[in-house]
Image (cartoon, grey):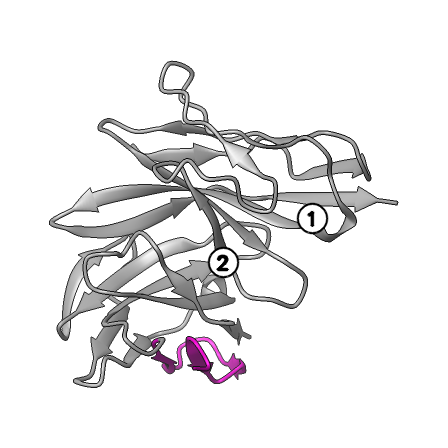
Amino acid sequence: AQRVTQPEKLLSVFKGAPVELKCNYSYSGSPELFWYVQYSRQRLQLLLRHISRESIKGFTADLNKGETSFHLKKPFAQEEDSAMYYCALSQMNTGFQKLVFGTGTRLLVSP
Amino acid sequence: DAGVTQSPTHLIKTRGQQVTLRCSPKSGHDTVSWYQQALGQGPQFIFQYYEEEERQRGNFPDRFSGHQFPNYSSELNVNALLLGDSALYLCASSPTGQSYEQYFGPGTRLTVT
C-alpha cells in the first residue's frame, strides 16, 4: 500500500538553526513527491515538487529512492517558516493524480 | 481570481442527516478533487472529477458521492452522517493534465452531533 510517514508531529528550532523535516514513503512504482505547507490562517499550498528540483523560500528536498525518503531541508530557519508541513505522494492512475498525504509536521521557529 | 472557493464555511448536522458541500475551482481549472481531513491528520483523498465524471476514488463508502457541473464546480454529498464524518472537507482544483499541482480551498468544517 502507498503510504507517507512523517515521524515528527512537532519540530521546534531557533531562528537561524538548520531545519530538516523528515518524510518516508512506501510506493510500488515510480513516485512523485511533494511538500505542501499551510501557514496560519491560510490554505494548504504547494511548496515544492521533487521533479522540479527547485529551491523555494530556501527549502530543498531530495528524493532518495534507496532510503525511500524525501526530507525537507533549510540551512537557516526564519520565524516566517513556522507552519504545518505535509509531505505528499502522487499516485498516477489513468492520467489522473491523487495525493496521499502524511500526517504533517508542525514547524515552530522561535526568535 | 478568488482561487478555489468553498461553501459553507462551517456546518453542524445531526447523525443520520445528509449534507451537501460546494466547491468552485480556480479560474481555468477543470479538475476537482475532494479530501477529508480529520483532526490531527493529513488530508485523505475522497474522489476526483473531470469532465463531469468521477475519475478516481479513495477508500470511502458509497455514502460519499459527488457531482461536477458543466462550469466545473462540484458538490460533495454525504448521506446517513456518522459522528466519524466530522472533519474539514477540502476541495482542490487543477488544470487539465497537471493534477499534480492542486490548489486548495479553505475547506468546510463539518461537525456531526
**Mark positioned earlier in the residue sequence (2 or 1):** 2
**In magenta segment, residue B6:** yes
Residue at the (45%, 54%) spot, across then down: B43
Q: Marks 2 and 1: CB-CB under 8 Å? A: no
Under circle 2, the secondary element is strand
Residue A45, numbered label: 2
Packing grade of label 2 (10 A; few <14, some 14-19, many >=20) is some
Under circle 1, the secondary element is helix
Q: Residue B78 location in percent, x, y? A: 34, 74
Camera-nearest residue between A28 and B102: B102
Quadrant assignment for the N terminus of chain B = bottom left
Q: Which residue lies furthest to the top in this view?
A: A66
Classify B109 as above or below B100.
Answer: below
Residue at the (25%, 56%) spot, across then down: B98
Residue type, label 1:
Asp
Residue at the (40%, 77%) spot, across then down: B16
**In magenta segment, residue A63:** no
Q: Residue B70 location in percent, x, y? A: 16, 85
Q: Residue A10 location in percent, x, y? A: 70, 39
Residue type, label 2:
Gln
Q: Residue B92 location in percent, x, y? A: 37, 66
Classify B28 as above or below B102.
Answer: below
Packing grade of label 1 (10 A; few <14, some 14-19, many >=20) is some
Pointer 1 residue: A81
Q: Give the range drawn in magenta.
A: B1-25
